[in-house]
Amino acid sequence: MDVHESVLELVGGTPLVRLRTPGGEESAALYAKLEYLSAGGSVKDRIGLHMIEQAEREGLLRPGGTVVEATSGNTGAGLAMVAAVKGYRAVLVVPDKTSAEKIATLRGFGAEVVVRRSGLPAEDPDNVFNTAARIAAERPGSWLAGQYDNPANPAAHYATTGPEIWRQTDGRVTHLVACVGTDGTISGTGRYLKEVSGGAVRVTGADPAASVYSGGDGRPYFVEATGHVRHPETVEDLWPSSYQRDVVDELIPVADREALLAVRRLAREQGLMVGGSAGLAVAAAQRVAAGLGPESLVVVILPDSGRQYLSKYFNDAWLLRLGFLDGEEGTARVGDAVAPAVRAEPLPYVNRLSTAAQALAVLRALRERGLPALAPAGPCPVGPDRAPTVPELAGSLRLDALAAALEDGSLKPDDPVRDHLAAPLPHFGVGEEVRAVLAELEERGEELAVAVRDGHAVGLVDRSALRALL
Ligand SMILES: Cc1ncc(COP(=O)(O)O)c(C=O)c1O
């Protein structure tokens, strides 16, 4: 019989499939490792199994115990699947930006899911990591998987992903391209391939352009589950202890737009329905392959399936609202209302830690420019080269409300405005049709909105500027 005794035997063992590249036969062959074909649906099944079995061997996890982890979803699914087979409970703490499909998957495996706000500083006791650590400390019989610091994470890839690639390519692989999140995939797979090839295999990390790994400032971005975000109020920014800089030869930063459009092209042109980090990795791998001749063989790891992101990367309305699609030619679009003069100047924005006196100056300057005296507010540091991203549009501040709070003494000029913010302003993508946007603003009773391109605020538009385009 050709059968398996449990689903755990179907973790990993994923195929390599050739991708068409712009350079065709003239450039290096590019093969994609389809991790979405692992039993639990992602590259993280491997570490779910390895971390749990290592904890069992070390006596950290005993029968009837509980697996706890902070996870953006895939590690959770891997852990929850293995926990289900082995009879453990699983408690998974996820940030609220995690796609609904991923959260439903975790619950589907029987896990308890705890949702915590995303975008909190590292020191905030309510962020996902501190919450998971607290739960593990409080519940008897718990074991915190700790993928960022657990040596069994890279070890899983050293033991499985690396040897699979070497065997599948008959030792002809010359380049590896992978995302860098916890860094387990690239460190473990890369180290194995370097060792077995006598140092010949070159390892490239694909990184979101804003991620701190490749030199970005750590502001939020829209490709989920990879790279490293740094909240501006984080004091000590810890990188995963598994991060092995000697394994990664170079990092290629890839902008959100390029990654997300690559995701859609992979599905439409090559029949591969994959997630955002896979699009990011393929965008980087195509750059690597383009610079190499046909004697080279590049392997790129595609971490998970696009079915987990149907409400995001495969949803035109989501992409349009964030300004990743340009909309219909020939129609009046939100971008047309962002006057060049406004675009050239820094967007008015109030940092939530700014003092009331500083915020007052920003809002008065707006009124003097004839704009509504209302500005988006949040954690983004203010500066000419620093436009907030959508997650940083966390609130708003009105001149009249600020003046009233100063007047009645509930706010002193030197106090931060943090506790006096109102709801965020609505935002619209630059490619959205003006007619529909006006209708939505009217329905919501809003006068002013933020125009967004590629997930970044590029200007303020008010109803009269939009109406003038019709
Ligand atoms: C979809 C996806 N892509 C990429 C990564 C990054 O992989 P690693 O954590 O091994 O660096 C992850 C990790 O969670 C992931 O879930």
Image: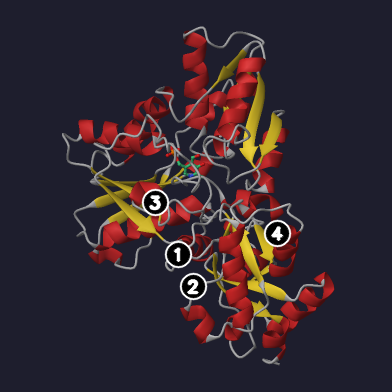
Amino acid at dot 1? Gly
Instruction: Return the x and y of residue 189 as percentages of the image width and height.
Output: 34, 35
C-alpha gap between disc 3 and disc 4: 44 Å
The reply to whether discs 3 and 4 touch (Cβ–Cβ < 8 Å) is no
Q: Residues within 10 Å of mark 3 (few under 14, many from 20)?
A: many
- Asked if labels 2 and 4 touch by Cβ distance under 8 angstroms, the answer is no
Distance from label 2 to label 3 (Cα)? 27 Å
64 up-or-down from 393: above or below: above
Q: Quick check: 204 above or below 350?
A: above
| SS at mark 1 in the image | loop
**Eye-nearest disc, 2 or 3:** 2
Tell me the residue at 74%/84% (across/down): 435
- Mark before the other along the chain sequence, 2 or 1: 2
Number of the label disc, if any, that sits on residue 346: 2
Question: Which numbered marker is on residue 207?
Answer: 3
Residue placed at 62% from the left, 73% from the top? 364
**Residue type (three-letter) at the residue carrying disc 2:** Pro
Q: Is residue 227 left or right of residue 371?
A: left
- Between marks 1 and 3, how big is the CA–CA gap? 24 Å
Q: Which of the two discs, 4 and 1, labels the residue nearer the N terminus?
A: 1
Whether pointer 2 and pointer 1 mark residues with C-beta atoms closer than 8 Å, the reply is yes
Name the image quarter holding residue 4. Answer: top right
Residue 319 picture location, percent across and down = 60, 66
Residue beneath label 1, please? Answer: 383
Dot 2 falls on a residue whose secondary structure is: loop
- Disc ID at residue 406: 4
